[in-house]
Image (cartoon, helix red, strand yellow):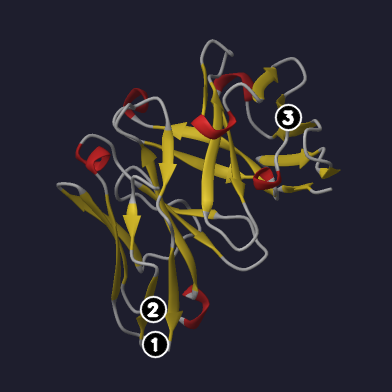
Amino acid sequence: SSELTQDPTVSVALGQTVRITCQGDSLRNYYASWYQQKPRQAPILVICDKNNRPSGIPDRFSGSSSGNTASLTITGAQAEDEAEFYCYSRDSSGDHWVFGGGTKLTVL
Amino acid sequence: QVQLVESGGGVVQPGGSLRLSCAASGFIFSNYGMHWVRQAPGKGLEWVAFIEHDGSSKYNVDSVKGRFTISRDNSKNTVNMQMNSLRVEDTAVYYCARRRCSSGCAPGDWLDPWGQGTLVTVSS
């Protein structure tokens, strides 16, 4: 079982704001990063180092963290944001890594 | 540009072996740790293995310990994974990804970029 827990599905109306969360004890010590994966494509990084966006990622994507929970927020969701989102961090041992189970985002 | 290209996937019988390779270009390969991540059909991402930039440290997920070995050749800009005693449950797309860090890799690191993946199918 994954040490990082995500809600399996989340939906948002077009143009509205959605938050995707990731819970795990290791997040008290390590930052999470977030990845977007569309069908039949490799994942791409959308948030790193808790709240930094790589170049090319729209500024509607942001990250935050509190206690054992990391969050990815999309402010003004677009149709092209529909995808699977994964959080990623180290596990509690510090020398293994783990992904959350993934959240499928539907934009209505 | 920064690029990772995996190769070596294919169909193999249970108990068989495969060697995956990942060719890196567009960056100083010897400065970066590298990971392998897999994704079974219709399932989520699973971290598999990591090797430090100089090969000094290696880590595996428990389910592949003793069967998969990660290695690298910094003179050829490649990271490899030797997979032995393959099982049906190892069937997946295997991605290599570069490790990026800030602040000496504590408290955070991330994966960027990823390769396009190579499919491994273990079936009789």
Mark 1 and mark 2 residues within 8 Å of each other at the beta carbon: yes
Mark 2 and mark 3 residues within 8 Å of each other at the beta carbon: no
Residue located at (37% from left, 81% from top): A11
Number of numbered markers: 3
Residues B9 and A40: in front is: B9
Q: Which of the chains bears the disc numbered 3?
A: B
Kindly identify which residue carries mark 2.
A77
Picture quarter containing residue B97?
Answer: top right
Quick check: B31 above or below A85?
Answer: above
Dot 1 falls on a residue whose secondary structure is loop
Residue B57 coordinates in the image, percent (x, y): 51, 14
- Image side of residue B21 versus residue B72, left or right: right
Kindly identify which residue carries mark 1.
A14
Residue B16 coordinates in the image, percent (x, y): 81, 33
Q: Amino acid at mark 3?
A: Ser
Mark 1 and mark 3 residues within 8 Å of each other at the beta carbon: no
- Image side of residue A49 versus residue B117, left or right: left
Mark pair 1, 3: CA separation: 48 Å
Q: Amino acid at mark 1?
A: Leu
Q: Amino acid at mark 2?
A: Ala
* Residue that lies at the very extreme toward the left in this rendered image: A67
Mark pair 2, 3: CA separation: 45 Å
Residue B115 seen: no
Kindly identify which residue carries mark 3.
B85
